[in-house]
Image: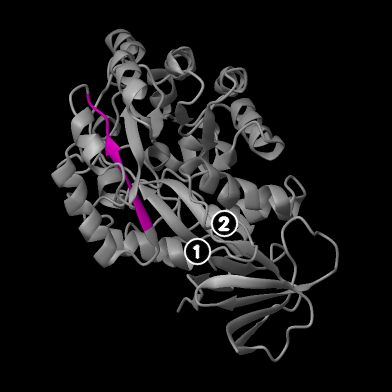
């Protein structure tokens, strides 16, 4: 007898009324079909709800080590898992920054002990740590290297020449924070530090992003695995689409919010890259729905409300997102902007492919049973008191999204 049966569920890509049964045993999906009732020790009645592969968030900042007052590996992975995100990739701009093999291994041990979902890790690339990266790139928790082309939280800038040298010898995923530090410094010299969150877009203009993306595209060669984080404007999409082999992601806040929301949100809307105008937000959303952007990733970067309440120049950049990833994407399904097949691709299938995770990312026999059950037609009015991230707030607070998952299954076990 199998461990678990999801009965009478709808599956992504099959958007008619037809329902299926999904059988889980030993942590894996073992069969998908009909009329399996009575074959499993436990049954989750689907009642026509949508069963989706667990989301894979390629871009989170769980703040451990160094800033655990606003998030840690346990709290962040718990918030993610309860929201249907079963795998995350955590960024290296910690204190200390993850630039050496020993720092990576120490963090990997923390993640293995504390993570409720799968926690994979990036290592920061510098001009002088290729040997350190090579020492850990075969570790099962290694996701790739993060390249900061412009200053952001942690200030670990790596220039494009160092990237070219590294990419010639390192066979791994390179993920980029694509803002040109040269442009950012030129703008800051001209405009100063700004006085309110409304200045943030001017201080980090589109040209900073497009300059960096062009550098990345000119450096990329076939066989290199380059991935651009948090695409925020139309021009970036156009450059990446013409590159021929670079993958990319967009964050929900760059699709569902715009610079017009800054007056309402103040420093809560401060993130890097900044919120763009409504036309760019719509262009990014269209690109996600059409396939020009490969996946949705949150850039979950929590800070406390007290930290955000200081004057703009000193307020940290970043917003939380793991709680709202699945509800945001399911809202696109509910509105008709996105099919269930595309929703599964941008949240699970494509991230699995980019990361090289062949054991997950879809609902098929032999794959890991990372799943969530949801009803996209049901609504959730986002409220800060329901945010599970330690920071306790969301830039989408007050917005109506689709409801959070009803049931989450991780490695074949129901999550409580």
In which quarter of the view is residue 112 placed? bottom left
Assess whether mark 1 and mark 2 are in contact (beta carbons under 8 angstroms): yes
Which residue position holds label 1?
83
Quick check: is 350 in the magenta stretch? no
* Figure check: 344 above or below 126: below
Please state which of residues 399 and 5 is positioned toward the viewer in this rendering: 5
Taking 394 as reference, is 63 left or right?
left
* Figure check: 307 above or below 317: below
Taking 309 as reference, is 275 left or right?
right
In space, the residues marked 2 and 1 are separated at their CA atoms by 7 Å
Please state which of residues 135 and 349 is positioned toward the viewer in this rendering: 135
Q: Position of residue 404 (x, y in %)?
A: 57, 65
Q: Secondary structure at mark 1?
A: loop
Which residue position holds label 2?
326
Q: Is residue 388 visible?
A: no
Quick check: is 120 in the magenta stretch? yes
Q: Which residues are magenta?
A: 119-126
* Figure check: 22 above or below 115: below
């Amino acid at each position: 007898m199998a461990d678990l049966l999801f009965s009478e569920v709808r599956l992504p890509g099959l958007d008619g009324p037809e329902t299926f049964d999904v059988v889980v045993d030993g942590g894996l999906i073992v069969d998908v079909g009909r009329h399996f009732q009575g074959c499993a020790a436990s049954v989750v009645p689907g009642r026509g709800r949508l069963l989706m592969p667990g989301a894979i968030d390629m871009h989170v900042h769980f703040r451990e080590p160094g800033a655990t007052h606003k998030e840690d590996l346990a709290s962040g992975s718990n918030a993610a898992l309860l929201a249907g995100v079963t795998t995350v990739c955590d960024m290296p701009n910690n204190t200390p920054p993850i630039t050496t093999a020993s720092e990576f291994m120490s963090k990997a041990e923390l993640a293995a002990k504390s993570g409720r979902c799968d926690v994979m890790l990036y290592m920061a690339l510098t001009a002088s740590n290729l040997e350190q990266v090579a020492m850990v790139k075969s570790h099962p928790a290694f996701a790739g290297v993060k390249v900061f082309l412009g200053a952001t939280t942690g200030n670990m800038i790596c220039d494009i020449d160092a990237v070219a040298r590294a990419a010639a010898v390192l066979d791994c995923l390179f993920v980029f924070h694509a803002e040109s530090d040269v442009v950012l410094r030129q703008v800051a010299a001209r405009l100063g530090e700004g006085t309110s969150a409304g200045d943030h877009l001017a201080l980090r203009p589109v040209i900073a992003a497009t300059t960096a993306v062009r550098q990345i595209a000119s450096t990329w060669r076939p066989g290199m695995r380059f991935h651009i984080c948090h695409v925020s404007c139309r021009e970036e999409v156009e450059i990446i689409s013409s590159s021929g082999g670079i993958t990319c992601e967009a964050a929900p806040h760059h699709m569902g919010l715009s610079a017009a929301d800054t007056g309402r949100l103040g420093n809560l809307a401060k993130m890097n890259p900044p919120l763009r105008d409504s036309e760019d937000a719509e262009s990014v959303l269209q690109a996600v729905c059409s396939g020009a952007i490969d996946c949705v990733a949150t850039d979950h970067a929590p800070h406390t409300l007290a930290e955000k309440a200081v004057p703009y120049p000193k307020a940290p950049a970043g917003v939380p997102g793991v709680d709202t990833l699945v509800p945001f994407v399911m809202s696109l399904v509910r509105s008709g902007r996105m099919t269930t097949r595309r929703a599964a691709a941008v949240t699970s299938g494509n991230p699995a492919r980019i990361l090289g995770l062949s054991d997950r990312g879809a609902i098929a026999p032999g794959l890991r049973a990372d799943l969530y059950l949801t009803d996209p037609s049901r609504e959730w009015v986002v409220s800060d008191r329901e945010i599970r991230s330690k920071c306790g707030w969301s830039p989408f607070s007050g917005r109506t999204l689709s409801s959070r998952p009803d049931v989450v299954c991780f490695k074949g076990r129901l999550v409580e």
